[in-house]
Image (cartoon, helix red, strand yellow):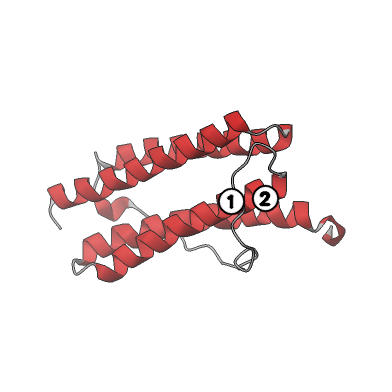
Amino acid sequence: MDSEDFQKIITNAIDNEVESYTFYKSVADRVKDANLKTIFLDLAEEEKGHREYLQGLLLRDAKQMHFVAARDYKVTDSIDEPVLSVDMKPLDGLVLAIKKELQAAQMYTQLAAASADAEQKMVFVQLANMEKGHKARLEDIYTNMAYPEAW
């Protein structure tokens, strides 16, 4: 993979993080529930941090990316994606965020599978691992909120 290919991959990943930031911020601006607003503002800030991290990668070598794949317990995989609304409940908001992270991870996984170049494949695998980590973190929050009796 040459420098130009790497820059295109990271630039596309940055665009995805900006899109996620915009989505989370717009949800936070629209919902009435204070807890859900806080969750989505936190998610927006995380996406902003991811964008900054990826922008830093443009100055470095692809080989410096290292993310361990998070264990996927598929906690919310059988739950339908809720419709975005201003009256959405916190658990529904978390499910929506989890589904968004899952979609991003799946996109990067598919790009990795389609990559013939080993370095390019590695970049996509690392990006997928990053998104899977976000999903796992959100599922932990979801589990703690949805099943408080497990505490």
Marks counted in the figure total 2
Front position in the image: 64 or 90:
90
Residue 129 visible to the viewer: no
In this rendering, the answer to whether 117 lies above or below 27 is below
Label 1, residues with CA under 10 Å away: few <14, some 14-19, many ≥20: many
**46 lies left or right of 141:** left
Which amino acid type is shown beneath numbered disc 1?
A: Leu
Q: Which residue is found at the position 25% from the left and 50% from the top?
A: 9
Which amino acid type is shown beneath numbered disc 2?
A: Asp
In this rendering, the answer to whether 29 lies above or below 78 is above
Residue under numbered circle 1: 96
Indicate which disc residue 1 carries.
Answer: none
- When asked about the image quadrant of residue 36, the answer is top right
Q: Quadrant of the C terminus?
A: bottom right
> Residue 125 location, x and y as percent?
36, 62
Q: Quadrant of the N terminus?
A: bottom left
Indicate which disc residue 92 carries.
Answer: 2
Label pair 2/1, CB-CB below 8 angstroms: yes
Q: Which residue is found at the position 12% from the left and 53% from the top?
A: 2
Residue 35 visible to the viewer: yes
In this rendering, the answer to whether 24 lies above or below 69 is above
Which SS class for mark 1?
helix
> Residue 100 location, x and y as percent?
50, 52
Q: Which residue is found at the position 20% from the left and 45% from the top?
A: 7
Which SS class for mark 2?
helix
